[in-house]
Amino acid sequence: MHKIEPDFLNSIVRVVLSETITLEEIEQLSIELHNTVTDKKTFLLTDARGVNFDLKTDDLDTLVNNIGQTNKGLNAENMVFEAIIVDSPKESALTILFNLRNKRFNHTYNIFSTESAAINWLMSEQK
């Protein structure tokens, strides 16, 4: 499951993931975010604590391709800064693998273990 909170804090969009997340749900989330966020600079706080990613490594390549198609209309002016909060080694590894394969020039991310550190980083990127 997922929930999008567009006006979480100081232009930060919060995405809360829960339970088990599948390839299909991540693709749906990508489409919803694309339709929800219209700012040239987007600041995402993705809370994936306690989530079980039901993904295989092959799914990561599928995700990269599908998200690339969803975001095809974005250009260099559209920047995404994403702070991802995780609390397990498996989710950390999957997040890192995905982001290594997802080499979009306009998407900067960092992985955090606490919400306060993630928010501080996003706030510093807003300046």
Image (cartoon, rainbow, N blue to C red):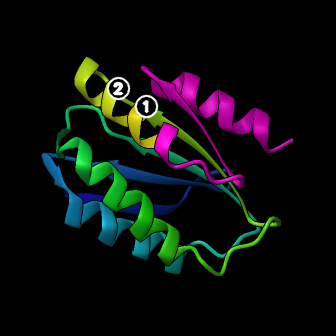
111 within the magenta span: yes
Classify 10 Å Cα crowding around label 2: few (below 14), some (14-19), many (20 and above).
some
Badge 2 element:
helix
Q: Amino acid at mark 2?
A: Ser
The magenta segment: 100-127
Residue 52 can be seen, yes or no: yes
Of the pair 95 and 127, the residue shown nearer to us: 95
| Residue at x-position 47% and y-position 28% | 115
Q: Relative to 49, does residue 47 appear above or below in the rendering?
A: below
In the picture, measured across the screen, residue 116 lies left or right of residue 60, that is right
Q: Amino acid at mark 1?
A: Ile
Can you give x and y, in whole percent of width and height, for residue 89 in the image? 27, 18
Q: Which residue is mark 2?
A: 92
Quarter in which the N terminus is drawn:
bottom left
Classify 10 Å Cα crowding around label 1: few (below 14), some (14-19), many (20 and above).
some
| Residue at x-position 30% and y-position 22% | 87
Q: Relative to 72, does residue 6 appear above or below in the rendering?
A: above
Q: Nearer the viewer, mark 1 or mark 2?
A: 1
84 within the magenta span: no
Q: Relative to 97, does residue 33 appear above or below in the rendering?
A: below
Q: Relative to 96, does residue 58 appear above or below in the rendering?
A: below
Q: Quadrant of residue 42?
A: bottom right
| Residue at x-position 46% and y-position 36% | 84
Looking at the rendered structure, the number of numbered marks drawn on it comes to 2
Mark 1 and mark 2: Cα distance apart in space: 6 Å
Residue 88 can be seen, yes or no: no
Q: Which residue is mark 1?
A: 96
| Residue at x-position 32% and y-position 38% | 48
**Circles 1 and 2: CB atoms closer than 8 Å:** yes
